[in-house]
Image: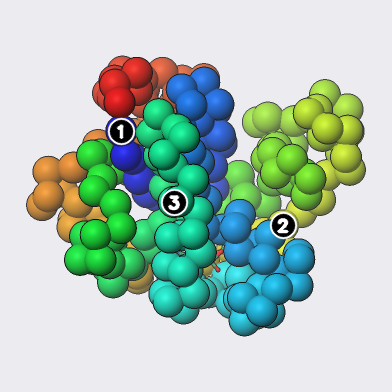
Amino acid sequence: MRLIFLGPPGAGKGTQAEIISEEYDFLHVSTGEMLRNEIKNGTELGKKAKKYVNNGELVPDNLVIEILQLRLKESEKHHGIILDGFPRNLKQAESLEKKDILDVDHVLYFKLDKEIIIERLSHRLYCPDCKKFYNLKFNPPKKDNICDKCGRKLVRREDDKLESIKKRLEIYNEKTYPLIDHYKKLNKLIEIDASQTIEEIKGLIEGRINLEKA
Ligand code: AMP
């Protein structure tokens, strides 16, 4: 089963991808996470990507496609794949098809209003070690500012500042939103109400797709 999780930043794509990947043995492919790792490790690719990521802009397609293809080599060991944060524009979507990178079964569109997105992102914290996300209002850690999973101090993502959030939303509306129509036409789009709680959204996904199916 090959899935794309599509939707605005802060809609909960990463959180659901993490939960589902663990429970159903999917490979969780987050291009944003891979880019943050490259930046943290100071690799050549990370150096090229840093200014785009920190400003909330899209990293050039060729760099993202390069790391995506490397990561997909690990997919054979898994029951399925979730692409989280890719594709982000029509060219990337077409590259999946034209370059024969991945034949996608379903695209889950996490639908959420702008006001809730800003509210969620401005209360978001992140564990730089195990990469788990928290929300101070809706999904706080058990101990203040400490990761439940690994005990590390939580941080804010560089691009979760109001200016970068606004930029990411602008780019989402201009470049990523048109993908909804693209996948509707291909008859692959499934809409999910992303304003619900984490458990409820998981239930909605499980209700629409048979995740046990290979
Ligand atoms: P995310 O973790 O998905 O919110 O992504 C964080 C940042 O990484 C984005 O704002 C972009 O700068 C970059 N990024 C992630 N995925 C892509 C992609 N598919 N294409 C271009 N840039 C990306």
The residue lying at 33 percent from left, 67 percent from top is 92
The residue beneath circle 1 is 1
The residue beneath circle 3 is 72
Give whichever of 48, 197 is nearer the camera: 48
The residue lying at 78 percent from left, 28 percent from top is 149
User: Of the residues tagged 2 and 1, which is closer to the observer?
Assistant: 1
Pointer 2 with pointer 1, Cβ within 8 A:
no
**Where residue 30 sits in the image (x, y, percent)?**
52, 51
Q: Considering the numbered disc 1 on the image, is that residue within a helix, a strand or a loop?
A: loop
Question: Which quadrant is home to the N terminus?
Answer: top left
The residue lying at 12 percent from left, 43 percent from top is 187
Give whichever of 166, 56 is nearer the camera: 56
Q: Describe residue 208's horizontal placement relative to residue 168 as left or right.
A: left
User: Of the residues tagged 3 and 2, which is closer to the observer?
Assistant: 3
Mark 3–mark 2 distance (CA, rounded to whole Å): 25 Å
The residue lying at 48 percent from left, 26 percent from top is 25
**Where residue 183 sits in the image (x, y, percent)?**
19, 51
Mark 3–mark 1 distance (CA, rounded to whole Å): 14 Å
| Type of colouring | rainbow
In the image, is the residue at mark 1 within 8 Å of ligand 1 by its beta carbon?
A: no
Of mark 3 and mark 1, the one earlier in the sequence is: 1
* Residue 23 visible within the image: yes
What amino acid is labelled 1 in the image?
Answer: Met
Pointer 3 with pointer 2, Cβ within 8 A:
no
Image mark for residue 157: 2
Mark 2–mark 1 distance (CA, rounded to whole Å): 31 Å
User: Of the residues tagged 3 and 1, which is closer to the observer?
Assistant: 3
Vertical relation: 9 (above or below) 135? below
Q: Residues within 10 Å of mark 1 (few under 14, many from 20)?
A: some
What amino acid is labelled 3 in the image?
Answer: Leu
Query: Quarter-wise, where is residue 109 in the image?
Result: top left
